Amino acid sequence: MVGNRAYSIRDWSLGGISFETAPDASLTVGDKIQVVLKFRFLYDTITIQLPAQIVRTARRGIAAKFIPLPSVARRQFDRVLDSLHTERFLESQAA
């Protein structure tokens, strides 16, 4: 979520995010935004809210860097990564 709109994520890392937008998106390089990321897992949903700044825009996509990455957000990202690894491990054992 950026503002009140939900976007599809193309890519994310601890440094920032890339997401799809409509061709008429009104975001420009330098804009500061509030990003809310929701990661849904089998038994948990992790929500991370943090500020970001637009660093690149294209016709159907935007890239933003997190400014700065608060320690609380870092711990939440660690939980996301742990949950991803756990789910992938469990899937590999079920095959």
Image (tube, rainbow, N blue to C red):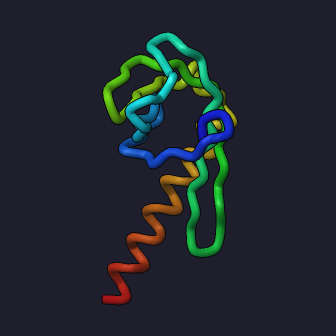
Q: From the viewer's side, name the closer residue of 27 and 34.
A: 27
**Residue at 50%, 10% in the rendered image:** 30
**What x and y, as percent, mark residue 65?**
47, 23
Occupied quadrant, residue 72? top right
Residue at image coords 43%, 79%: 90
Rendered-image quadrant of the N terminus:
top right
Q: Which residue lies most toward the top here? A: 30
Measured as percent of width and height from the top left, residue 70 is found at: 65, 27
Residue furthest front in the image: 24
Residue sitting at x 43%, y 63% = 85
Position of residue 46 in the picture relative to residue 19 (left or right)? right
Estimate the x, y position of residue 82 in percent, counting from the top left. Answer: 51, 58
**Viewed as shown, does residue 1 lie left or right of 56?**
right
Q: Is residue 50 left or right of residue 12?
A: right
Quadrant for the C terminus, please: bottom left
User: Which quadrant holds residue 61?
Assistant: top left
Q: Is residue 47 above or below residue 72?
A: below
In the rendered image, is residue 38 in sight?
yes
* Residue 83 sits above or below residue 64 on the image: below
20 w.r.t. 87: above or below: above
Residue 75 can be seen in this image: no
Asked whether 88 or 40 is in front, the reply is 40
Q: Residue at x 44, y 13 (%)?
A: 29
Count of marks overlaid on the render? 0
